Image (spheres, helix red, strand yellow):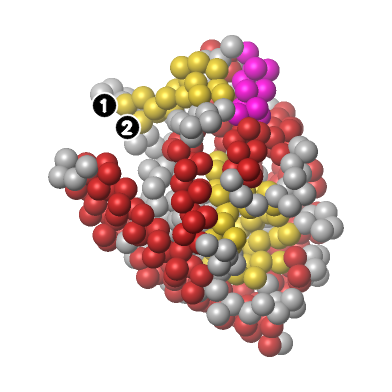
Amino acid sequence: MTSTNLTSPRVEIVGSFLPPEELEQAIEQKCQGAITVDQLHEVEDRVIDRLIDREIEAGLKIVTDGEMRRKAWDRDFWEDLGGMTRERIDTGRVYQDEVVRHDLLRCNGRISYNPEHPFFEKFTHMQELVAGRASVRQTIPSPGELYMRGMLQSNGDISKIYESPETFTDDIVEAYRQTIDELYRRGCRHIQLDSSVWGRLSDPDFERTLLLGGMDPDVITDTLLDLINRTVAGRPADLEITLSIAADETRTPRWGDERELRHLVKMLQSVDADAFLLPFDRRHPEHTEALRYLPEGKRAILGLVDGSVPGLESVDEIVEAVKVAARYVDMSQISISPTCGFKVRDRERQGLNYESQWAKIDLLEKAAERIAAE
């Protein structure tokens, strides 16, 4: 079990878990028409029920549904907002900055809050399963991710796909604000905004992509800050907002290059979040010195074990990284976690299996126990 000593870090997770074989088979059967949607949902319910029990048994104080019901970490949320649709692409070629898995997200009207969004019912189901044994964290893509999707899709000119740049950002903020309000009304006290943009802004190659598309990275940074801060402004005092940042599931942001830190530093100093989930390379504990820019009172969740590969890291390296971080953030405000969610794109090539993720959590627990004992 994870130590609850205030002088040791708490173990947390990014959110997603690899599905067990039972669910993978059910998904395949649904695709083949062998079972119905309702039968697939029954399997999902059983898998999530067992997952929650195991998360709690592993000592996690904040749990998720593992994103077991999602096809994609971002599009599944967006496509059920008003004004959004998923378009099936079966022929031709699509040129864009990421791999296309047959579906593209499109605006078919103005983006708006959907009071019937399926995430609400799924969260309520989670609350019932947890039954007060732990806190439930709802993960959703950051509003900045949707903004960047539009910017990249329109090559920097939102007016090509939307009424105006101003209404685009205003509509995103309002849809997210009302969604968060409804989750809070249903009992949610931990919301995580997942973002890959912040980590990529520190990458020269991504900056070059933006510049070639006529997009100023500094303007993008300011817009992303504005989107998040407007979205969470005036939230209840007991609602914790966590911003989870990354570059992608196999890379961490470029914390070690002072010249490329400006976007990340501005994020740490200016985003109105209560906690930041930040992936670091544990082999370079000095990179956690970036936490000196984190305002006092903010929680730092340090991603120190690679959630995309099965190999186990060194407990000594994890402990050393936490010790360096503790020079800048009080130990009571530090948690440790994987660098990314466990539901990676190419699990077979990367060698992951269902038990790999639990071995990673157990490793983090051992590191927390070591720190508590020292």
Residue 173 part of the magenta-drawn span:
yes
Tell me the element at label 2: loop
Q: Are marks 1 and 2 in contact (CB under 8 Å)?
A: yes
Which span of residues is magenta-colored? 164-175
For label 1, the residue is 90
Q: Secondary structure at mark 1?
A: loop
Instruction: Give the class, few, some or many, for how many residues have Cα within 10 Å of label 1's Cα (few <14, many ≥20).
Output: few
Q: Quadrant of the N terminus?
A: bottom right
Could you tell me residue 207's position as x and y percent?
A: 62, 35
Question: Image point 81% across, 65% down: which residue?
Answer: 328
Q: Quadrant of residue 205?
A: top right
* Viewer-proximal residue among 351 and 331: 331
Q: Quadrant of residue 289?
A: bottom right
Residue 230 appearing in the image: yes
Label 2 is placed on what type of residue? His
Near mark 2 (Cα within 10 A), the count class, few <14, some 14-19 or many ≥20, is few
Q: Quadrant of the C terminus?
A: bottom right
* Residue situated in front as seen by the camera: 12 or 99: 12
Where residue 63 appears, as percent x and y from the top left, is: 54, 61
In depth, the one of 208 and 151 nearer the eye is 151
For residue 195, above or below residue 286: above
Q: Residue at x 68, y 27 (%)?
A: 216
**How many marks are shown on the rendered structure?**
2
Q: Point out the tag, 1 or 2, that comes first from the N-terminus.
A: 1
Residue 225 in view (yes/no)? no
Kind of residue sitting beneath label 1: Asp
In this rendering, the answer to whether 371 lies above or below 127 is below
User: Would you name the residue on which mark 2 appears?
Assistant: 102
